[in-house]
Amino acid sequence: MTEVTAANPRATRTLAEWLAWQESLHPKDIELDLERCRAVAERMGLLPPPYTVITVGGTNGKGSTVAMLERIYREAGYRVATYTSPHLVRYNERIQIMHEPVDDAHICEAFAAVEVAREQIPLTVFEFGTLTALQLFAGAALDLAILEVGMGGRLDAVNVVDADVAVIATLDIDHVEWLGHTREAIAREKAGIMRAGRPAICSDPQVPHSLIDAAAARGAPLDLLGQSFYFVDDDGQWTWWSGDCVLDHLPKPSLVGGYQLRNASGVLKAVERLHGRHPVSKDQIMRALATTVLPGRFQRLPGAVDFILDVAHNAQAVEYFVATLMTLPAVAKTHVILGMLSTKDRASAMQSLSKVVDHWHLATVSARHGATSHELYETWTTLSRRAPSTQYASVAAAYAGALEHSAAGQRILVVGSFITVGEVLQCLARAEPTADA
């Protein structure tokens, strides 16, 4: 591979080559620090951005919150961009303008601009991607950009941008090696996206005191679910209110799961907070809630054998997934394709899944920090309810094995990581008959 340097920033032309090269820039996968990213952003003239910024953090529910916000503002006629991570199938999914992933050529051009500006500053892959998104957004004549925190908040690269509104979804235990081992410690890190005098919103109904204290210390007005905004589930519809603002007879979010009402409540509070700058009508909100799409979040693909795919990869998310699954009609047999990273709490996730699984298909995740099928098997041996299990050398092999063991009327769950869901989505896409077939 030709070396990429500031003097020769376009030497590597393909997106895949750029991404492979970026992995060599910094000795660590994750290095939480804002100074490197901020220095390059300032050199590139990216701060402050000319558009409204909503930054979304939290442990779970970030993707759903971003998707609903994006859909609402696009329905209202605004020009909107999103930056999210990780991706399911293609890197381009991370950087979208008007719900369209930016193409390879434009991403590579932005990569080159970042490379020129960084000079000798080492950047992680995520920092490089964040700066690339901001560079692309700078030339897109945006009204709003919705930025998803990669991990934590206080020292995450996304936090180089001052949010006009900060939204924090749920708070739970994850990434303990970087964020801490308690909800209180994790909440302090995630509170770092709040800014003085700018609204902050949390849609977790059990907010750690550390988040409230951090908002007060920063001078950020904090809106909490159950204290300054509320919702009630009216079976087929729901009602949301905050002060004198009441939105009733709302359609349930198209995203599946009872927890989505909490996510949607935080979304509506953010929309209310920005109403003076970016007005949105109730009809636009209703249409958007009913039509938001987000692959990999309790995504159901019906067929002779039904597939249900979810990127849940920590204890809380898997618990939510299982709770939603148990509201569905029973089936003859439930298989699960499970692939996880070695850094995740496998025991808690698998204990929750064991309530609904009749056959485990344990897959080695071929990625940095991917757990092997044998590591998953060792955790399987500790479960109080052990349905039969089979080990596979890859996610694709687990997909083939699950299909071989399943029959019409049964279902296959795919869960554990973005990588696992993304690889199975690719397997399913290859299995679809073409128009000419």
Image: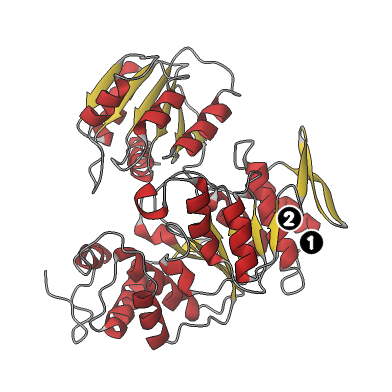
Which quadrant is home to the C terminus?
top left
Disc 1 to disc 2: CB gap under 8 Å: yes
> Whole-percent x and y of residue 132?
38, 73
Tell me where residue 367 appears, x and y as whole percent.
Answer: 24, 46
Residue depicted at 42% across the width and 46% down the height: 181
In the picture, residue 325 is in which quadrant? top right
Q: Which residue is mark 2?
A: 285
Asked whether, in this view, residue 10 is left or right of residue 250, the answer is left
Residue 71 visible from this viewpoint: no
Which label number is shown at residue 307?
none
For the residues marked 1 and 2, what is the alpha-carbon distance in whole angstroms? 6 Å
- Mark 2 closeness class: few <14, some 14–19, many ≥20 residues within 10 Å: many
Q: What residue is disc 1 on?
A: 281
Left or right: where 304 falls relative to 431 = right
Q: Secondary structure at mark 1?
A: loop
Quarter of the figure that contains the N terminus: bottom left
Q: Name the one closer to the observer, 279 or 341.
A: 341
Q: Quadrant of residue 361?
A: top left
